[in-house]
Image: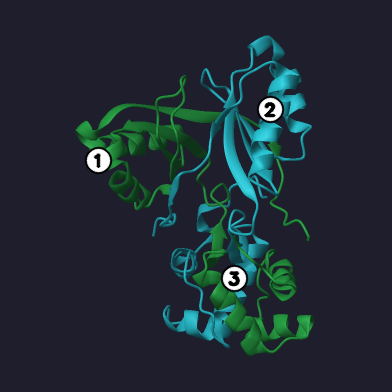
Chain colours: A green, B cyan
């Protein structure tokens, strides 16, 4: 299991909302936490190497950037090829999230890819591109458009 | 989160290059904006000013480390259920009342309600799903991620 010490937790709490937009952001965080810049950089590097930090990056706001249509495309692909196909689909520049998930008695699809576009027609065009790419390895597919946001809360890290 | 679309001229070529370049690999160095800017032909100060503006106009939702909740000991699970149309809003209220439900979307499918559970422990996923089943009388299908493929979303240049 993952072990985080108190300093890691304070570092996570101080950075999970974002990095300060200053020339030396890690020095700023270090000053706030009573650490050195080197300690902050080293700890963040270790968290990154351990996969606790997935990436340090910007998150574009798809909606503001004109990608107002999005659909959860789902694909029933052969299990043996699913990993390789997931890599291929995930690499498409219009796919923001791509996952393998288990099937269920009422659900035959194992590959999920979120498609974004400026219109539903554009999303359907991208879906056709994915279908062409998957070829015979795909036995069936569907797309689920969201019709309403019922709840949306940010991710919060619990203390302790 | 901003729910309006920016005018098409809100971003210039440099903004788009920044959006595409910074979707992974921001440096862990003393002067990371200088280093990231150099790859884009920008000074650190210019990159910071651009990012401030992109954030102010809502083109980016956040900038910094993305933490893996599972790696920190938490758990996530995508779940779905089929709510009868006549009872949909009542079911949505029952589901949303659980603080473990991070977000919830109505979708046009036989499985018409899709939500994400976020809990402090893996065991709490099954417990929460079980409570929702007991309250609603509906099966909560669980679709935990087995594998994630992330490359990033590109802004058309």
| Residue denoted by label 1 | A133
Q: Quadrant of the C terminus of chain B?
A: bottom left
Residue at image position (66%, 30%) is: B129
Query: From the viewer's perspective, is residue B22 above or below residue B61?
Result: below
How crowded pointer 1 is (Cα within 10 Å; few <14, some 14-19, many 20+) is rated as some
* SS for callout 1: helix
Q: Residue B139 in the image: x percent, y percent? A: 61, 20
Measured as percent of width and height from the top left, residue B120 is found at: 70, 49
Question: How far apart in space, not on screen, are marks 2 and 1 (Cα)?
Answer: 38 Å
Per the model, the C-alpha gap separating discs 2 and 3 is 44 Å
Q: Are marks 2 and 3 on the same chain?
A: yes
Indicate the chain on which mark 2 is placed.
B
Which residue is tagged 3?
B51
Q: What residue is rendered at 69% in x and 51% in y? A: A155
Cβ atoms under marks 1 and 3 closer than 8 Å: no
Please state which of the two labelled residues, at mark 1 or mark 3, is closer to the viewer: 1
Q: Residue at x 57, y 53 (%)?
A: A61
Q: Chain of mark 3?
A: B
Give the side of residue B141 with respect to residue A120, left or right: right
Chain at numbered mark 1? A
């Amino acid at each position: 299991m993952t072990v985080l010490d108190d300093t890691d937790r304070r570092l996570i709490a101080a950075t999970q909302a974002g990095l300060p937009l200053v020339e030396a952001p890690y020095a700023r965080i270090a000053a706030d936490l009573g650490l050195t810049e080197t300690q902050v950089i080293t700890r963040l590097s270790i968290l990154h190497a351990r996969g606790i930090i997935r990436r340090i990056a910007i998150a574009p706001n798809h909606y503001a950037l004109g990608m107002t249509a999005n659909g959860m495309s789902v694909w029933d692909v052969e299990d043996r090829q699913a990993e390789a196909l997931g890599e291929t689909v995930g690499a498409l520049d219009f796919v923001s999230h791509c996952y393998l998930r288990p099937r269920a008695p009422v659900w035959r699809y194992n590959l999920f890819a979120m498609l974004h576009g400026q219109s539903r027609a554009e999303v359907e065009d991208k879906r056709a591109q994915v279908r062409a790419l998957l070829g015979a390895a795909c036995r069936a597919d569907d797309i689920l458009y969201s019709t309403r946001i019922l709840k949306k809360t940010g991710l919060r890290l619990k203390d302790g | 989160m901003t729910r309006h679309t920016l005018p098409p001229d809100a971003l210039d070529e440099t903004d788009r290059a920044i959006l595409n370049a910074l979707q992974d690999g921001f440096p862990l160095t003393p002067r990371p904006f200088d280093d990231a800017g150099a790859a884009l032909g920008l000074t650190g100060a210019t990159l910071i000013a651009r990012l401030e503006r992109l954030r102010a106009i809502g083109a980016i939702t956040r900038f910094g480390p993305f933490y893996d909740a599972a790696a920190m000991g938490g758990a996530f699970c995508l779940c779905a259920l089929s709510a009868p149309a006549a009872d949909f809003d009542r079911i949505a209220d029952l589901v949303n009342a659980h603080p473990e439900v991070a977000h919830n979307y109505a979708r046009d499918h036989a499985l018409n309600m899709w939500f994400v559970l976020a809990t402090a422990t893996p065991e709490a996923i099954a417990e929460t799903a079980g409570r929702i089943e007991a309250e609603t009388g509906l099966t909560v299908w669980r679709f935990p991620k087995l594998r994630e493929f992330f490359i990033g979303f590109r802004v058309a240049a």
